[in-house]
Image (cartoon, helix red, strand yellow):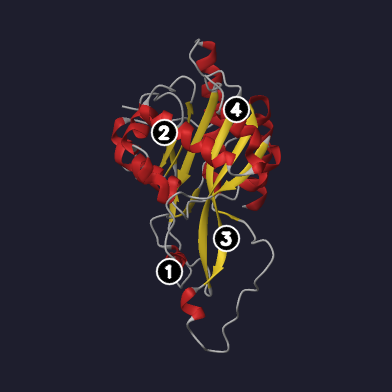
Amino acid sequence: MGKRKELKDNDVQMGGTDPRVDSDESDEDMDIVNVDFEWFDPQPIDFHGLKILLRQLFESDAQLFDMSAVADMILAQPLLGSTVKVDGNESDPYAFLTVLNLQEHKEKPVIKDLIAYLQRKASANSSLAPLAQLLSQTPVPPIGLILTERLINMPPEVVPPMYTMLMEEIAWAVQDKEPYTFSHYLLLSKTYEEVESKLDMEDSRPQKKKKKSGGKAEKFYFHPEDEVLEKHARCFGSIEYTHTHDDGHSDSKRAFQELGIRTKGSLMLFDADKLDGAINEMKEYVKASV
């Protein structure tokens, strides 16, 4: 059984709105339900919960990969990475963060698929040229692929402790001569753009405001901390998913009253010695935003 992680004095252990409460419902006249979050090592009981969060992270392209194999890899390194739970050790994780060594696992089919996918996507965006070059090397450099996801209304305060513990665990693993000495870190995440609702386009009611066409669409972050982390990245950029949804899909993900959203993948490449500074600034940002 995984050991419950102990938070350090400078970490935050907090209550928050229950992430199981639907965001639409929580906006109405409902009582706030305070919950306590607990951090744990990844353990076998988390297999299905991790798969759900991984599919959420990879969005429509999750079908391209063996997510069971990815979950197994996360569970195979139980002393590296964290899950966040609400109802104790036996419950499903509501958030997780871990890192996988792309070089160490380069011969595993799912990592081969991931490297090819990431290299292809990076090559399609000039902003990600340094990443495309790294991933095209043979063998691929020791890049640590950071995977992290959480339920949509989990508070960002759960994130800094996970990063703090991950960096400590990597340092301990390196001391023990384990293969976690990275040249770079690659963070996979998601962003979205607001798009005009197809339903509203078909609605002739004059009071509906139309989104102005032209110009570059504004980027929004599913993970608010990504906006800070980007500032420390060697390169970053958006990627288009291979499997795209039809035009009506954005209406099923309407984040605001009049606009739908279109999701994109996000990649951030960090030099290994820059990630600590990025995490420290991210901690201050999250603390200030509470």
Residue 198 in view, yes or no: yes
Q: Which of marks 4 and 1 is nearer the N terminus?
A: 4
Q: From the viewer's perspective, is the residue at label 3 or at label 2 nearer?
A: 2
Residues under labels 4 and 3: Cα distance?
Answer: 28 Å
Residue 93 in which image quadrant? top left
Q: Quick check: 91 left or right of 256?
A: left
Q: Pinpoint residue 81: horizontal percent, then vertical percent.
A: 46, 30
Q: Residue at x 67, y 44 (%)?
A: 228
Q: What residue type is labelled 4?
A: Leu
Viewer-closest of 238 and 90: 238
Q: Can residue 90 be seen in this view?
A: no
Q: Quadrant of the N terminus?
A: top left
Mark 3 → mark 2, Cα distance in angstroms: 27 Å
- Check disc 4 and report its element: helix, strand or loop: helix
What amino acid type should be assigned to the residue bearing mark 2? Asp
Among numbered discs 4 and 3, the one appearing first in the sequence: 4
Q: Quadrant of residue 63 in the image? A: top left
Residue marked by disc 2: 113
Judge from the rendering whether residue 73 lies leftward or rightward of residue 270; answer left or right.
Answer: left
Where does label 3 land, which residue?
A: 193
Tell me if mark 4 has few (under 14), some (14-19) or many (20+) residues whose alpha carbon lies within 10 angstroms of its own. some
Helix, strand or loop at mark 3: strand
Q: Mark 4 points at which residue?
A: 134
Tell how many labels.
Answer: 4
Q: Distance between the residues labelled 2 and 4?
A: 16 Å
Q: Which of marks 2 and 4 is nearer the N terminus?
A: 2
- Residue 23, percent across and down? 45, 63
Amino acid tagged 3: Glu
The residue labelled by disc 1 is 248
Front residue of this view, candidates 220 and 33: 220
Q: Nearer the viewer, residue 133 or 207?
A: 133
